[in-house]
Amino acid sequence: AQSVTQLGSHVSVSEGALVLLRCNYSSSVPPYLFWYVQYPNQGLQLLLKYTSAATLVKGINGFEAEFKKSETSFHLTKPSAHMSDAAEYFCAVSDQGSGTYKYIFGTGTRLKVLA
Amino acid sequence: ETGVTQSPTHLIKTRGQQVTLRCSSQSGHNTVSWYQQALGQGPQFIFQYYREEENGRGNFPPRFSGLQFPNYSSELNVNALELDDSALYLCASSLGTGFTDTQYFGPGTRLTVL
C-alpha cells in the first residue's frame, strides 16, 4: 500500500522567506500525489496535484511542488511567504486498497509565518 | 458551481448516542468519500459511496455506516458513540471512483462526544 511521510510537524518562516514543506512517498506504482491546505476550523482545499503529466506542478497561491522519483519526494515550495499562508498543509497519495481509490494523508505540517 | 457542503457545522453528543452527518456533493459528482480527522492528525478514510452503493471501506467498525441518495448526497451515521469518535468529519466528492478523479472536500462537521 502507498504511504506518505511529512517531515516536520511544525515549520516557521519569516514573511518573505522561502517556504519548503517536505513530503516523501512510498508507492509500488506510479503515484498520484496531492497537497492540500487547511485553515483553522475549515476543510481541505486542494493546492496542487501531480498526475504524471509534468514533474513540476504549479498550484494556487504561488505554491509549486516538484515530483522527484529518484528521491521519492514531492516537496512543496513557495518563494516568498505571506502571513496568509499560515495554515496546516497535508500531503496525500491516491491509493488503491481493496479496489477503492482513496487518499492516504500524511500527518500534516503546521506552517507559521513570522512578521 | 456549488461546492461540497456539509451539515451541521458542529455537533455535541454524549457517549452511547447516535449521530447523522450530511453531505451534498459538488454538482456532477457521483462519488462521495468520508474521512475522519482526529485532532492533530491527517484525515483517515472511512468509506466511499458510488451510485448509492458502498464502494470500499477503511478500518472502521460497523457502527460507522452510510447512505448515498439518488441525487448523490450522502449521510454518515455513527451508532453507540465513543469518546474517541470526537473528530472533524470530512466529506469529499469526485466525478468518479478512478485513480485520476480528484476529491474535493467540504468544510467538515466537528463532532464532540462527551
Image (cartoon, grey):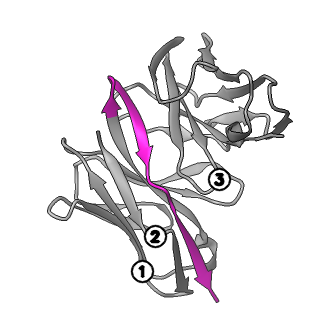
- The kind of secondary structure element at disc 1 is loop
Would you place residue A96 above or below residue A16 in this image? above
Instruction: Point out residue B59 in the picture as x, y percentages from the top left corner.
Output: 48, 30
Residue sitting at x 54%, y 58%: A37
Residue sitting at x 68%, y 35%: B5
Residue in the foreground of this view, choosing between B77 and A75: B77
- Distance between the alpha carbons at the discs numbered 2 and 1: 8 Å
Whether residues under marks 2 and 1 lie with C-beta atoms below 8 angstroms apart, the answer is yes
Would you place residue B49 above or below residue A18 in this image? above
Pointer 1: what residue?
A79
Residue in the foreground of this view, choosing between A107 and B54: A107
Residue kind at label 1, given as amino acid type:
Pro
Count of labels in the image: 3
Residue kind at label 2, given as amino acid type:
Gly
Would you place residue B96 above or below residue A88 in this image? above
Tell me the subunit letter for badge 1: A
Q: Give residue A23's quadrant in the image.
A: bottom left
Pointer 3: what residue?
B39
**What mark, if any, has residue A28 been given in the picture?**
none
Would you place residue A10 above or below residue A106 in this image? below
Sooner in the amino-acid sequence: mark 2 or mark 1:
2
Quarter the N terminus of chain A occupies:
top left
